[in-house]
Image (cartoon, grey):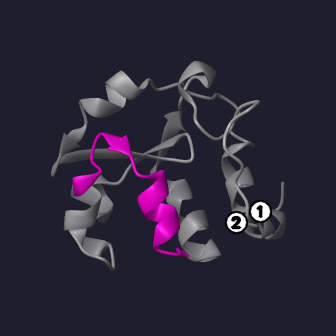
Amino acid sequence: MDQTKSLRNPLLFNECVINKRYVSLEEVSFHDTIGDCWIVIYDHVYDVSTFLDEHPGGREILLEYAGRDASCAFRSTGHSKVAIYALKRYYVGELPIEERIFRKVGGYALIDLS
């Protein structure tokens, strides 16, 4: 998949991962410190530990959601497509289907993101 197509639909960039790793919400919950900060955005898990001090909104907001789902906060701040694509470098894995909120049959729709 080319990068241009990924930018048009930023949630596609992780769909091309060959060896998908499934990470449970329980496992994510153990990564909730300044030195080990994982968050969930749209059912994808990201290790943002090295990004904390670079985050334009400050590290406090990321730490508030450390070890938890940050999808609503991420969406409500109006992140750009570039910001969404930049998450790729922090990708750890995705939630198992039974723990997903968005990317499943009957899940919440992701409108206004592409």
Badge 1: few (under 14), some or many (20 or more) residues near its Cα, within 10 Å?
A: some
Name above or below for residue 83 compared with residue 41. below
Q: Which mark is residue 113?
A: 2
Q: Marks 1 and 2: CB-CB under 8 Å?
A: yes
- Magenta span contains residue 75: yes
* Most foreground residue, 88 or 40: 40
Q: Which amino acid, by three-letter code, is at mark 1?
A: Asn
Quarter that holds the C terminus: bottom right
Name above or below for residue 87 compared with residue 108. below
Image x and y of residue 106, in percent: 74, 32
**Apparent side of residue 24 relative to residue 28 in the rendered image (left or right):** right
Q: Which amino acid, by three-letter code, is at mark 2?
A: Leu
CA–CA distance between discs 1 and 2? 7 Å
Name above or below for residue 15 compared with residue 90. above
Name above or below for residue 57 compared with residue 30. below
* Most foreground residue, 16 or 60: 60
Image x and y of residue 111, in percent: 73, 60
Quarter that holds the N terminus: bottom right
Residue plotted at (29% across, 51% down): 65
**Apparent side of residue 62 relative to residue 46 in the rendered image (left or right):** left
* Image quadrant assignment for residue 55: bottom left
Q: Foreground mark, 1 or 2?
A: 2
**Apparent side of residue 65 relative to residue 107 in the rendered image (left or right):** left
Farthest-out residue, left: 34
Residue plotted at (68% across, 38% down): 103
| Residue placed under numbered mark 1 in the picture | 9
Image x and y of residue 18, in percent: 71, 33
**Apparent side of residue 69 relative to residue 107 in the rendered image (left or right):** left
* Most foreground residue, 62 or 108: 108
Q: What residue span does the magenta drawing correspond to?
A: 64-79
* Most foreground residue, 66 or 77: 77
